[in-house]
Amino acid sequence: MSQSSPQPGGTFPSRPQDRRQDLRPAPDPVPPAPADRTVPQARADRTVPPEAVRASDAEREAVVERLRVASVEGRLTFEELAERTEAACMAVTRGDLERITTDLPGMGAPGANPAPLQVRRKFSAIMGDCKERIVGRIAERLEAVSVMGDVELDLRGAQVPTCAVTVHATAVMGDIKIIVPDGVTVELTGYAVMGDRRVAVREARPGACVPVVRVAAHAIMGDVTIVDDEHHAPVRRALASWWKNRQ
């Protein structure tokens, strides 16, 4: 029996399928996408204690602003404001910042009215003495004038809305002493003619954003002195420190 020859262009019906493609190496498997191991910030803050989280500059500035508002509201004196502001600027962790404001209410708390305004702004002594402890809110510059007399102006108990106080001091054959809180920065300008201008305050730590006391002092055969609590009453401070260490 004769077999029919294949027609041109035809295929053998019984020819097995070409399996060369099965011999090709399989492509490398695509690795699965790595799981996102990033912990959301909110969840991380809940799991890590504040003492272990570094504070940012923005957080320090927010605490300083909160302290300033507390001073305006009469919750902090100028002395307390200076102390806490310095601590806030030098804080390392969030825990340090929380301890600074632990006894203060939130911003805009009920009853948060401004402290009473310091109405009297000029203090004079002419052939006499004048001692004044400021306890109100300082909204404008203060003025001290001494003519053959003594003026002592204590700013430690004041409330300072802007973290800065300006004092114009004129001493003519007299003395003016301005007492400021520990830790503030004093900027002294003016002149002295046969007189003296002195600043005896502890220097703030470098980089600390502490309150500022600006004094324009004019001394004519007189003295203008700016001192902090440490230099104003060293004996009293030494006794207080000794008593505290005993307990």
Image (spheres, grey):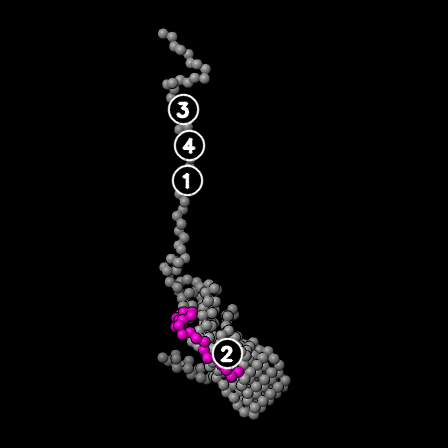
Q: Position of residue 15 (x, y in %)?
A: 38, 19
**Which residue in the protein does label 3 denote?**
18
- Tell me if mark 4 has few (under 14), some (14-19) or many (20+) residues whose alpha carbon lies within 10 angstroms of its own: few
User: From where the camera sits, is residue 77 visible?
Assistant: no
Numbered badge on residue 25: 4
Q: Who's the residue at 58% across and 79% down the image?
A: 216
Marks 4 and 1, the one that precedes in the sequence: 4
Q: Nearer the viewer, mark 4 or mark 2?
A: 2
Marks 1 and 2, the one that precedes in the sequence: 1
Numbered badge on residue 139: none
The three-letter code of the residue at mark 1 reads: Val
Task: Tell me how far mark 4 sits from mark 1, CA to CA.
Answer: 15 Å
Q: Secondary structure at mark 4?
A: loop
Query: Quick check: is 165 in the magenta stretch?
Result: no
Numbered badge on residue 138: 2
CB-based contact (under 8 Å), mark 2 and mark 3: no
Q: Is residue 43 above or below residue 226?
A: above
Residue 119 relative to residue 46: left or right: right
Q: Which residues are magenta?
A: 102-121
Q: Secondary structure at mark 1?
A: loop
**Which residue in the protein does label 1 denote?**
30
The quadrant of the rendering that contains the N terminus is top left
Query: Quick check: is 113 in the magenta stretch?
Result: yes
CB-based contact (under 8 Å), mark 3 and mark 4: no
Q: Secondary structure at mark 2?
A: loop
Q: Who's the residue at 38% across and 8% down the image?
A: 2
Task: Tell me how far mark 4 sits from mark 2, CA to CA.
Answer: 84 Å
Q: Who's the residue at 51% across and 73% down the image?
A: 162
The three-letter code of the residue at mark 4 reads: Pro
User: From where the camera sits, is residue 11 visible?
Assistant: yes
